Image: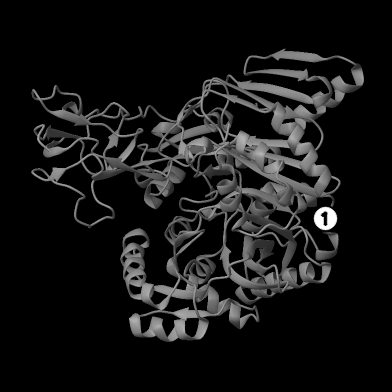
């Protein structure tokens, strides 16, 4: 079915991003906006805007019934959920199916298969992917049995969690009972699902992920990304391809991701997250994200593809337009997430009014943002203001160009993390490439020396 | 009509080959200033002026400011404000007992609640030693930076 009118059920930069592709494809875009976003930049760019609900996300962007109601009211024939919010919630996909509206995402069955982290893990095993040693912890005795096999330190993870949410580190057997009990009650409160499982904690691991696109019959791998620069499991900087990994491991990771996509009969964009062991040069399956990712532009830069357009095409029921041999990766791309946070004050959030936005421009530079002079950044949602994406001939070129672009970027009115990215890009260990997920905390600790941060 | 990054890049290319250093464009729906910043490269300042095309007459709900959060304090009491604006939670998790309740003793360091701002949680400390006499912001309510979360009757000077 050809999509003619699409409801964008999200906000921020991804809403602006989806609207841009709609305009290019001749699809009418209708933004479903909360009261806090009715005057936002995406609202000005969309063909039309429909009110979704009050500012708190639970009453707007997280309410499947409100989204479907908005889609019906405006006569949309498709809903794009963006990332976060309801993007991987089977309730929205189901409600869309029942209303005869195309959900731009995977099938309800796929969302169930990968949304439950234990089920996703068993699918990965069935598809032949290596997984981190671990298992379900139905009670303390079961947890102790699993812990005896995987050893300490280990992670307690919520079955309903993901994306860094619902994880706890256990350093020793003495800590297990207390941490397990806390994890169970927090999982029940946060995800409505008290189940947890244990996984070996890999101290020096990198977060590497493979982008896949499937049409339900076949799938292609669109290269990998490295997202190891994280603070408290939140990504700050991403790049494609993942640096300092042998060619044959890149190929093996792509093959593993495709095996999982084939096993699931996957349709849509998906990301297979892997834990890459720096010492052993091996990888294990972590989880699969059944949506477009924040960091998708680095893949777009090196592949030359519009992933939102491809996502819409397979949602329309079209077969893949790409064969694996058509996909070539050119150069290296990096993304700096510019957040409204003060990194000099423990990343204190900084909502407020934007006075002026001046962005670097030119070949190989792309800034995805939802703010301009006069925009209000509400306190109700995440702090992402803009993504500075830079493409270079190789990693060193991309980093050098990113440094120059950061000097030109100016967002006045709120404190941003742009200075943090300048410091990051000047760091020798980071510049060498292939840092692990523990790197950023070390980087911060080094800067908390008496000299302080400026 | 919005300009895409590709459009802006094309403008930069055209300027670059023309030898011009700056272009300022004003249309009904947008303004764009593209400028050469010396050897560092180019910048673009872009504003979409077009008003959102809002469906129907649905007026946004005006957030009702709880009156009591602004009312005057009883003599001799101290207000506890959030460290930054956000959604106030009285308990560490849904269903959990509140951090403190009316009648509880607090000191400067006592955590009396959590404020969620941009999905980040910040503990709220009482900042004063005394007894909680009243809550003025309910669980899950939004609080501006100057809102009164709760009221404390300070303890006497004797430690």
Q: Is residue A41 left or right of residue A422?
A: left
The colour scheme of the drawn protein is one colour
Position of B44 relative to A6 (above/below): above
Image spot of residue A240 (x, y percent): 74, 53
Quarter of the figure with residue B138: top left
Identify the residue at image location x=73%, y=13%. B24
Identify the residue at image location x=79%, y=37%. A401
Q: Is residue A63 left or right of residue A127?
A: left
Q: Is residue A231 left or right of residue A326?
A: left
Front in this rendered view, residue A426 or A37:
A426
Q: Is residue A27 visible?
A: no
Image spot of residue A346 (x, y percent): 47, 41
Q: Secondary structure at mark 1?
A: loop
Q: Is residue A86 visible?
A: yes
Image spot of residue A313 (x, y percent): 67, 54
Identify the residue at image location x=51%, y=65%. A111
Position of A222 relative to A144 (above/below): above
Front in this rendered view, residue A401 or A357:
A401
Q: What residue did someone put label 1 on?
A: A329
Instruction: Using a 10 Å C-alpha cutoff, classify the residue at mark 1 as few (fewer than 14 neighbours), some (14 to 19) or many (20 or more).
Output: some
Quarter placement of the N terminus of chain B: top right
Question: Which chain hosts label 1?
Answer: A
Image spot of residue A20 (x, y percent): 65, 37
Q: Is residue A296 left or right of residue A252?
A: left
Count of labels in the image = 1
Front in this rendered view, residue B18 or A25:
B18
Quarter placement of the C terminus of chain B: top left
């Amino acid at each position: 079915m050809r999509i003619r009118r699409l409801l964008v059920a999200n906000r921020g930069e991804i809403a602006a991003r989806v609207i841009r592709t709609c305009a290019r494809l001749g699809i009418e875009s209708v933004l479903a906006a909360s009261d806090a976003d009715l005057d936002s930049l995406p609202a000005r760019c969309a063909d039309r805007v429909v009110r979704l609900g009050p500012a708190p996300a639970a009453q707007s962007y997280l309410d499947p019934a409100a989204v479907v109601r908005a889609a019906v009211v405006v006569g949309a024939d498709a809903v794009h959920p963006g990332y976060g919010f309801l993007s991987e919630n089977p309730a929205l996909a189901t409600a869309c199916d029942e209303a005869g509206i195309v959900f731009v995402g995977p099938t309800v069955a796929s969302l169930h298969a990968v949304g439950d982290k234990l089920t996703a893990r068993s699918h990965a095993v069935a598809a032949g992917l290596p997984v981190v040693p671990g298992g379900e912890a139905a009670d303390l005795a079961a947890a102790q049995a699993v812990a005896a096999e995987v050893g300490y330190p280990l992670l307690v993870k919520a079955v309903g969690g993901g994306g860094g949410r619902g994880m706890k580190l256990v350093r020793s057997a003495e800590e297990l009972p207390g941490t397990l009990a806390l994890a169970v009650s927090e999982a029940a409160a946060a995800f409505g699902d008290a189940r947890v499982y244990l996984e070996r904690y890999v101290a020096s691991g990198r977060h590497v992920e493979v982008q896949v696109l499937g049409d339900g019959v076949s799938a292609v791998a669109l290269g990998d990304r490295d997202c190891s620069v994280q603070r408290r499991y939140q990504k700050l900087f991403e790049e494609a391809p993942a640096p300092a990994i042998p060619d044959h491991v890149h190929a093996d990771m792509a093959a593993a991701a495709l095996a999982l996509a084939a096993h699931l009969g996957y349709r849509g964009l998906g990301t297979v997250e892997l834990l890459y062991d720096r010492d052993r040069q091996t990888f294990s399956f972590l989880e699969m994200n059944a949506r477009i990712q924040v960091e998708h532009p680095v893949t777009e830069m090196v592949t030359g593809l519009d992933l939102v357009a491809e996502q819409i095409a397979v949602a329309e029921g079209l077969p893949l337009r790409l064969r694996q041999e058509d996909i070539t990766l050119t150069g290296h791309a990096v993304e700096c997430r510019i957040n409204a946070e003060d990194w000099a004050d423990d990343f204190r959030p900084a909502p407020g009014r934007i006075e002026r936005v001046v962005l670097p421009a030119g070949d190989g530079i792309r800034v995805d943002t939802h703010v301009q002079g006069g925009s209000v950044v509400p306190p109700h949602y995440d702090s992402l203001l803009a993504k500075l994406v830079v493409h270079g001939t190789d990693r060193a070129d991309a980093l050098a160009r990113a440094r120059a672009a950061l000097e030109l970027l100016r967002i006045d009115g709120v404190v941003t993390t742009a200075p943090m990215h300048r410091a990051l890009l000047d760091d020798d260990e980071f510049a060498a490439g292939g840092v692990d997920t523990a790197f950023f905390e070390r980087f911060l600790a080094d800067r908390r020396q008496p000299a302080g941060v400026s | 009509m919005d300009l895409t990054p590709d459009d802006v890049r094309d403008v930069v290319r055209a300027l670059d080959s023309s030898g011009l250093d700056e272009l300022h464009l004003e249309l009904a729906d947008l303004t764009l200033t593209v400028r050469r910043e010396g050897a560092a490269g180019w910048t673009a300042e872009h504003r979409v002026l077009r008003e959102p095309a809002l469906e129907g007459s649905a007026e946004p709900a005006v957030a009702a400011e709880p009156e009591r959060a602004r009312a005057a304090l009883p003599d001799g009491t101290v207000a506890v404000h959030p460290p930054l604006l956000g959604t106030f939670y009285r308990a560490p998790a849904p269903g959990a007992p509140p951090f403190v309740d009316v009648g509880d003793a607090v000191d400067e360091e006592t955590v009396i609640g959590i404020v969620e701002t941009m999905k980040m949680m910040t503990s709220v400390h009482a900042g004063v030693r005394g007894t909680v006499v009243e809550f003025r912001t309910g669980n899950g309510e939004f609080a501006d930076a100057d809102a009164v979360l709760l009221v404390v009757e300070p303890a006497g000077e004797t430690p």
